[in-house]
Image: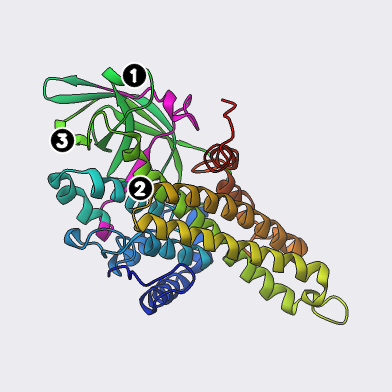
């Protein structure tokens, strides 16, 4: 599958429309009941992941020569959006093919591409991504995870926090810095660490989020790695790291947009039939107008997400960065509001397990916090789009 150069974000090609239809049909066959049951049982959605991978959805953005679909971030974000819209988002799509697959495709050696990309593309390998640290959240320049040379090997030490899906992963792409670059501006060094490597361990963080994917604190205690564990250059420009972070923002927006679509669908279905007096409650403007506003805001966020993906696939990294941040902001705000309004529209039923919207109250907040907070996005736009001075 290759991306068409004639597509625009809002007039999708027949191929992209077919991809939407295929992903939607597969996701609908599982649905939110399956997803929530797995999450509440503390289980992973392995069957869903396997089928999505078998149908080529997981690796749709990766190069064809390594078993991928040969398309772009637009297509992968489309997959993410449709999965979420049908109530069964796969969080590891954000991490494994979008961040790690992209970075390895762009900066990995031929051997690294052959070793990791086919498995990421067919879903047999899931790779987590580790950047956030206890004392280095939004300020990635404070990263203290450090790699030092020991003969021909690297020895990696540090801690990471809020790392998604480590228990599902065969490897983690760890962002650190070399011992020679411990001070000054961040020069990230990226290492592929198999999760069974001695000295690598993790503990689950208890979260009030209903999700089949868990968050972990990761401990890296003198982990010895071969020279070829380093991806790209040891003194890489920051662009190497952001090659993965822009897709992360696009995919985060796609997830939020899909979730917003999902919950609005539930709310609209309910208010069409729920009758208290003479007409269904959806006829009342107090119910109808807020839901209509939610729909407008989600559609607007979707346009910005599509713009970001199109710019990224066209190689406009700076333009994609602005659009990806805006898309992530808009989608997070719109999705959170839509969930809140859906619960309100259902009244008491909105807080029951039966109707499946209450579980999204906490989960929807994630879209305003991760992978970058709304406040840091506003900082980015103020500084880069408006040229305003920094306060930090």
- Which percent across, then down, holds residue 259? 56, 61
Q: Residue at x 23, y 59 (%)?
A: 63
Q: Report which residue position mark 1 lands on.
A: 182
Q: Is residue 122 magenta?
A: yes
Q: Report the number of discs.
A: 3
Quarter of the view holding residue 57? bottom left
Q: Secondary structure at mark 3?
A: helix
- Disc on the earlier residue, 2 or 3: 2
Above or below, 341 relative to 95: below
CA gap between label 2 and label 3 equals: 19 Å
The answer to whether residue 21 is left or right of residue 111 is right
The answer to whether residue 346 is left or right of residue 244 is right
Quarter of the view holding residue 392? top right
- For mark 1, does the 10 Å Cα neighbourhood hold few (<14), some (14 to 19), or many (20 or more) residues? some
- Disc on the earlier residue, 1 or 3: 1
Q: Secondary structure at mark 2?
A: helix
In depth, the one of 366 and 204 nearer the eye is: 366
- Which percent across, then down, holds residue 165? 39, 45
In depth, the one of 35 and 271 nearer the eye is: 271
Q: Report which residue position mark 3 lands on.
A: 228
Q: Is residue 165 magenta?
A: no
Q: Report which residue position mark 2 lands on.
A: 99
- For mark 3, does the 10 Å Cα neighbourhood hold few (<14), some (14 to 19), or many (20 or more) residues? some
Q: Residue at x 74, y 74 (%)?
A: 271
Q: Secondary structure at mark 1?
A: loop
- Which percent across, then down, holds residue 327? 53, 54
CA gap between label 1 and label 2 equals: 24 Å
Q: Which residues are magenta?
A: 121-147
């Amino acid at each position: 599958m290759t991306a068409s150069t004639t597509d625009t974000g809002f007039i999708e090609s027949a191929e992209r429309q077919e991809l939407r239809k295929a992903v939607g049909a597969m996701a609908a066959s599982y649905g939110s009941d399956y997803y929530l049951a797995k999450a509440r049982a503390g289980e992973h959605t392995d069957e869903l992941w396997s089928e999505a991978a078998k149908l080529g959805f997981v690796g749709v953005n990766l190069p064809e020569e390594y078993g991928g679909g040969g398309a772009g971030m637009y297509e992968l974000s489309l997959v993410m959006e449709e999965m979420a819209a049908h109530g069964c988002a796969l969080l590891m799509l954000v991490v494994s093919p979008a961040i790690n697959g992209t970075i390895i495709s762009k900066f990995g050696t031929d051997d690294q591409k052959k070793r990791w990309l086919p498995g990421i593309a067919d879903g047999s390998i899931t790779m987590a991504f580790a950047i956030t640290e206890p004392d280095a959240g939004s300020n990635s320049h404070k990263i203290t995870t450090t790699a030092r040379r020991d003969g021909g090997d690297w020895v990696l030490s540090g801690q990471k926090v809020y790392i998604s899906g480590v228990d599902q992963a065969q490897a983690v792409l760890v962002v650190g810095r070399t011992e020679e670059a411990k001070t000054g501006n961040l020069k990230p060094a990226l290492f592929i660490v198999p999760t069974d490597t001695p000295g690598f361990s993790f503990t689950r963080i208890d979260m009030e989020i209903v999700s089949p994917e868990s968050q972990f604190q990761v401990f890296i205690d003198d982990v010895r790695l071969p020279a070829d564990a380093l991806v790209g250059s040891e003194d890489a420009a920051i662009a190497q790291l952001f090659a993965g972070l822009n897709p992360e923002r696009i995919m985060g927006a796609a997830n939020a947009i899909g979730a917003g679509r999902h919950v609005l669908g539930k709310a609209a279905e309910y208010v069409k039939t729920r009758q208290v007096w003479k007409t269904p409650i959806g006829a009342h403007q107090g119910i109808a107008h807020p839901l209509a506003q939610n729909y407008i805001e989600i559609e607007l966020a979707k346009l910005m997400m599509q713009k970001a993906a199109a710019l990224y696939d066209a190689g406009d990294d700076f333009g994609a960065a602005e659009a990806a941040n805006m898309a992530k902001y808009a989608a997070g705000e719109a999705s959170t509001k839509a969930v809140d309004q859906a619960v309100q529209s259902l009244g008491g039923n909105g807080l029951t397990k039966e109707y499946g919207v209450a579980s999204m109250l906490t989960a929807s907040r994630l879209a305003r916090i991760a992978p970058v907070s709304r406040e840091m996005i506003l900082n980015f736009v103020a500084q880069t789009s408006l040229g305003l001075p920094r306060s930090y």
